[in-house]
Image (cartoon, grey):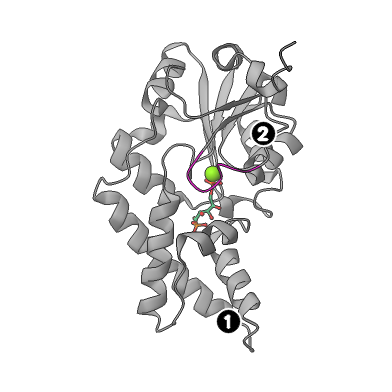
Amino acid sequence: MQAEAPAAVLCDAAELIRRAAALIFDVDGTLAETEELHRQAFNHAFVRHGLDWEWDRAVYRDLLRVTGGKERMRAFHTRLRVAPPLPDADIAALHRIKSARYAELIETGCCPLRPGVADLLAAAKARGQRLAIATTTSHGNIDALLSQALGTRWAADFDAIVAGDDVRHKKPAPDVYLEALARLKLEASDCVAIEDSANGLIAASRADIPVLITRSMFFRDDDFTDARCVLEDLSGLG
Ligand code: XBP
Ligand code: MG
């Protein structure tokens, strides 16, 4: 008797996507494997600011439990138990340097969209489905990535673009997804959230939005039990 596959594996991802009135995309790890560039940009900022911090991939994987670059740096400093805490002005200055470096790295073209993303965006648009973004990162980072990948007029195809600083609480709070639903004027059940991390799954689920997971570099082993579907990538869904 063959063991029952987990419900998420049995789901028909193409059907889940086709039925939705809107697709709400996470950015980092979902549209592109950007977290490795974020990590390099953080390390660049630490050197520029005269800090002897360096985040290798193992440290960064653990720190990614904290969403938001500024919050991540504050969490790391707290773990060092070095008093006094870094002033907000220093955190803000570090984040500006980091974001500028991230944009420079993205503009080299070294971080393409993940497999299937461009085709899915085009197919959804052709089917008359609406597109939205719900991310923890900044508008500047979204624009750097999608201008590079889709051209400078990329935003015209999205009905709602909600970034981390647009809401009070970042993921795993549902705020960015609730704001996206409000701007779309759609019910949660009429949409699908496309995510790569447990924090993203929790955020969308708290907004009652069905979630399709695309496994990514830093979150491969996260618990995706509550997702409707778990895929390696978005290939073939366009
Ligand atoms: C992932 C995040 C972001 C990025 C870094 O966002 O948690 O904090 O790691 O970007 P997503 P910032 O919801 O798209 O997966 O430094 O701009 O926060
Ligand atoms: Mg993500």
Expressed as whole percent of the image width and height from the top left, the position of residue 179 reads 65, 39
Which residue is at 38% across, 55% downward? 37
The kind of residue tagged 1 is Leu
Q: Is residue 140 visible?
A: no
In the image: residue 77, left or right of residue 106: right
Eyeballing the image, is 231 above or below 175? above
Expressed as whole percent of the image width and height from the top left, the position of residue 205 reads 72, 35
Q: Nearer the viewer, residue 21 or 101?
A: 101
Expressed as whole percent of the image width and height from the top left, the position of residue 189 reads 71, 21
The kind of residue tagged 2 is Ala
Count neighbours of disc 1 (C-alpha within 10 A) and say few if under 14, some if 14 to 19, many if 20 or more: few
Which residue is at 38% across, 21% downward? 119
- Residue at label 2? 182
Total numbered circles? 2
**Quick check: is 217 in the magenta stretch?**
yes
Which residue is at 50% across, 79% downward? 90
* Magenta residues, start to end: 216-222
In the image: residue 167, left or right of residue 220: right
Q: Quadrant of residue 73?
A: bottom right
Q: CA distance from mark 1 to mark 2?
A: 36 Å
Element at label 1 = loop
Q: Say the numbered circle drawn on residue 76.
A: none
Eyeballing the image, is 90 above or below 2? below
Expressed as whole percent of the image width and height from the top left, the position of residue 17 reads 56, 17
Q: Is residue 63 visible?
A: yes
**Magenta-colored segment: predominant secondary structure:** loop
Eyeballing the image, is 57 above or below 161? below
In the image: residue 221, left or right of residue 38: right
- The verdict on label 2 being within 8 Å of ligand 1 is no
Which residue is at 69% across, 19% downward? 5
Q: Quadrant of the C terminus?
A: top left
- Residue at label 1? 86
